[in-house]
Image (cartoon, rainbow, N blue to C red):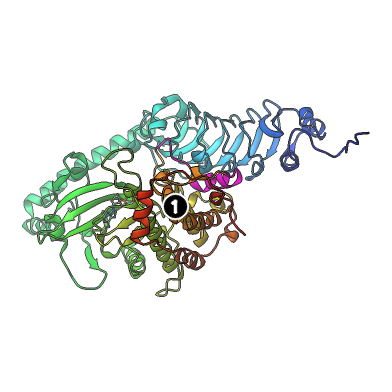
Amino acid sequence: ISLKINADIVIGFTEDERNALLALKAGFRSTFLDEKWQSFDCLDWYGVNCSDNRVVGVTLENLDIYGEVNLDAFYNLTSLSVLSFKNNSLFGQLMDFSRNVDLMQLDLSSNRFNGVISPSLVNLVLLQSLKLQDNNLSGSIPWFDQSSLKELNLSNNNLSGPIPDTKKLQSFNESCYDHNSFLCGPPSSTSCSDTAPPGGDNSGKPEKSGIGVILIIVNILGLFVLLFLLLLLYKNNKQLKKKIMENQKNIVLDHTDVEKRDDKEVEISSKMISHHENDQGKLEFVDGVLEFELGDLMKASAESLGKGNFGNTYRARLEDGRNVIVKRLRDLKPLSSDEFIKQLKAISAQKHPNLAPILAYYFSKNEKLLVQKFIANGNLFSRLHAGRGTSDRIPLRWSERLLIARGVARALEYLHINPNSHTQVPHGNLKSSNVLIDDNNMVLVSDYGFTSIISNTISVQRMFSFKSPEFLTSKKISKKSDVWSYGSLVMELLTGRLTIQSASQDENAVDLCNWVHRAVREEWTAEIFDLEIMGQRSATHGMLKLLQLAVRCCDKSPEKRPGMSEVVREVESIKVPNGDSESEDDLSGDRSLTDDSMSATPSR
Ligand SMILES: Nc1ncnc2c1ncn2[C@@H]1O[C@H](COP(=O)(O)OP(=O)(O)OP(=O)(O)O)[C@@H](O)[C@H]1O
């Protein structure tokens, strides 16, 4: 038997991978590569390393290659583990690495890459070495915190802003961040108050100039003179004194005092802040009925619930016993008072049984507050993950999870349709800590509409929707990004796993949308579902249906994801088991899940 070899058959890599490398080469001016990257056998390709018929390494160092690298150049190289373009003359934005989940070493040092450090890198949980030094990268450093990261060099770029306060980034020494225009905060020795904001000509490398130091001294002296004059005025002018006293009534929460103290209950009545005349603001109630005054809030005791991505959140107990939530918003767009009020009016006009109601808001020069109804039963993140492995843990049953999936779907559908407005703002930051559960086990989604008030740079860094595949390529979020976040949230409900959306600092957290595609491709079965619900055999059908829906919501292409109305229809079509059948399941004690019905492959 003669074996006919087709000369066009690719060996060692897939055809898609070979085409991707050819497309990459097309952007380069390199006669060397033109010559070396031709054959159909990966072995012949200079600098390309293949294993198990997949490209696992591309190492093109010191070759004087000039050219631009496409943003999605590595889209098809999904087994890539090592990539180095060290010391060439490559330019353009950093590539999107969201599909290169196996990437362990990335060296793009000594080139001319510009733009921001791709946020897709934050999600690479195997990344060990990241070398981006000696380029023209700008913007702030993303919140890297993967435990895998052992080596980092971001020096000699135009990066700016505080070095994020993550355990990992703080563990590298100063030299990794050296020579960046406006980077500040630990572990660098530059204090953030010393750095000028980025702008103007950014090309120069940092070097703290003598002029900068003189300016700071002049500023401090100016401040002293001002204080002295104020004191004189204060002494001599009784009227002014009276005014200051009046201003003192317009109290806003004292940031530093509340944060510094460890004890959770903090009396905030005497913590007065605003000394500026133009600091006065008004507490606007959404329903127009003045339920309490700002002064009442100030008299309340406050418990810090945590530092969210967009400000600190407190539970304030009013004198009449009522609890309200006060969010001190930060990192807002530069909105005027009118603009802020307009946006907050629009956000709070959205009313739905599954949206956490906003009660009031407050704007002054130094303080922007959001007052919300206090939701008593905590958030989904704690309900799903807290106390695992301990006897205190009360399992979250399948019926409860299904009802949560329903409630969240309905809330998103409402936001996407928004009958009260011509414009609909996607939620933008759906995650389990923003899903609250009240006394009646009602699901309430919070923090909606923030995309219209939070500054774009902060949204890009911190809001979950901005991590969707389409944002990484097209830089756009939409209602379909919310659908993607919803898919991820449903996966969290089904698997009980930690997602990077809710627990970015945790080394066990994974991008569940990526993970589920792998799980389905590799036909994992029982391992997908949370042990707490796996025993509920009567729920198997419903669990599979919800999983199939989550897979569709997690589709890489936004167009292929269902709209929220379709999602609601599908979730509502899943039967909620009654208490009896769930109890029978519990009694059966059968936790094995091995029959064929558990295949995760979506049905057509
Ligand atoms: N209306 C509310 N009632 C009860 N708890 C709330 C309410 N709003 C927020 N919380 C809780 O307060 C804590 C801090 O919330 P916050 O929204 O500031 O941060 P986050 O949800 O962790 O992150 P992000 O800022 O990205 O939304 C969370 O545990 C959240 O569940």
Q: Does residue 11 sit above or below 552 in this rendering? A: above
- Nearer to me, 320 or 114: 320
| Residue for badge 1 | 537
In the rendered image, residue 446, in percent from the top left (x then y), is placed at 34, 59
- Nearer to me, 310 or 14: 14
Judged from this view, the residue extending furthest toward the right is 2
Residue 256 in which image quadrant: top left
Q: Does residue 450 sit above or below 176 in this rendering? A: below
Q: What element carries label 1?
A: helix
Residue 56 can be seen, yes or no: yes
> Is residue 339 in the magenta section?
no
For the residue marked with disc 1, what is the amino acid?
Arg
Q: On the picture, is 223 further left or further right than 385? A: left
Name the residue rendered at 51%, 67% in the picture: 566
Q: Does residue 37 sit above or below 422 in this rendering? A: above
Q: Does residue 569 sit above or below 118 in this rendering? A: below
Segment colored magenta: 506-523
Residue 288 in which image quadrant: bottom left
Crowding at label 1, few (<14), some or many (≥20) Cα neighbours within 10 Å?
many
Quadrant in which the N terminus is drawn: top right
> Is residue 522 in the magenta section?
yes
